[in-house]
Amino acid sequence: MQDQNVAAYIGLDWGDQRHAVQLQPAGGGPIEPFELEQRPEVLHAWVAQLRQRFGGRPVAIAIEQRKGAVIHALMQYEFLVLYPINPKALARYREVFAPSGATDDPTDAAFLLDLIRTHRAQLRSWQPDTVMARKLALLCEHRRKLVNRGGALTNRLTSLLKQYFPQALDWVGALDSRQACDFLAKWPTLAAVQRARPATVRRFYQQHNCRRATVIDTRLAAMATARPLTTDPAIVDTLSLAVQAEAAQLRPLLAAVRAFDGEIATLFADHPDHDLFASFPGAGPVCAPRLAAAFGTDRPRWPAARDLQTYAGIAPVTERSGKSCWVHHRLACPKFLKQTFHEYADQSIRFSVWARRYYDQQRGRGNTHHAALRSLAFKWMRILFRCWQTRTPYDEATYLDALRRHGSPLMAPNP
């Protein structure tokens, strides 16, 4: 879209209750500062006024937000061209004119207006992907947040149980399971499980699909002879109540994760790139949808693999000043996107021959576990990108043959 086709420029500094806005028509004229309430009726009425005032011609809006209430309200209007501005970029731009660091909402709105008016050619407008792609991305991200909360609860349970009932960690099974939640709700102390009849405990395990008789017998024998770590009522009574509270919070979280898994699986099954991303070794039902969400369906968005590698924070960053040179990984990046490729690389070393050898090679050079995974993710992203651009599923045998033809050290015989 050319500059002459833009009817107006807007800098919008969003807030929880009110948004500071500065508007200037493209042909020049005075800057119009005003505020908008964060209410759907107000936002939609304002957009209707913009459409009428500028005859439906494009209006460029710079906003320090990539997702959230304001973006969700504005993205549905085709004549609004949204330019999400990285908060760090705005902060650096502000420092040029306000070295003291002083800031307020109207001032930030003015800086956003200046950015979009003078540097629009260097900024990338937000182009929404398909509804399916955006829904899959949101589902994957919010599922991961639930998993993180569940992990925090299981860590808390582990810490509490170690203080008064450590045997439970061997008897409940995986802490992030319905069996563990039900066990701890029923028998939160060693005394409680020892008072239960062995037949009752055996039936409990069987009802939770633990049917290996040898495992159940071993646990029942251990329960009969176990001794408490402590019998202090101040500790046992208090911590057992805390354990029951944590387990009660964990149970619905596990159910929510299962619900998200079902929704993701259903949506991903109809995704146009389902077979492509499902073909990657170790992707599975969790990583494959996340990889599809990371790339999206808008192929022109990423002209080269390097663009996505840089944006995701996987590509190394080099800083040079005089004789100093420092190479490090990028910290200011979309964390969930970076995490997606990092975690897929971790999974791939269990299923891909060359990925395992590359990871071992990196560790042999003295790199840490996470540094080795970032290097592996960098290589995987080039392969993923190539397959995504050509719509070709990955084939491990084909890639191994290519490595052999090029004399890759990864295919050298083990010493």
Image (cartoon, grey):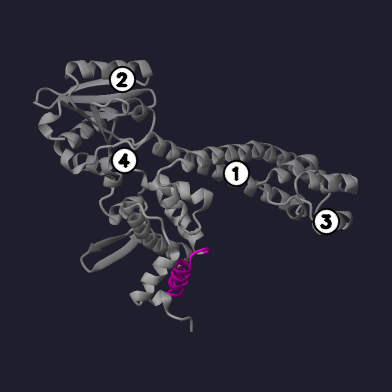
**Residue type indicated by callout 4:** Pro
User: Magenta part of the protein: which range?
Assistant: 350-367
- Pointer 3: residues within 10 angstroms few (<14), some, or many (20+)? few
| Residue labelled with disc 1 | 150
Foreground residue, 234 or 240?
240
Please give the residue where the numbered disc 3 appears in the rendered image: 213
Task: Tell me, yes or no, whether the two marked residues, 2 and 1, touch with CB atoms within 8 Å.
Answer: no
Amino acid type indicated by mark 3:
Ala
Which label's residue is closer to the chain start, 3 or 2? 2
Q: CA distance from mark 2 to mark 1?
A: 38 Å
Up-down: is 393 above or below 19? below
Relative image position of residue 341 (x, y in whole percent): 42, 54
Amino acid type, mark 2: Leu
Q: Earlier in the sequence, mark 4 or mark 3?
A: 4
Q: Secondary structure at mark 4?
A: helix
Location of residue 261 (image quadrant): top right
Q: Can residue 6 be seen in the rendering of this structure?
A: yes
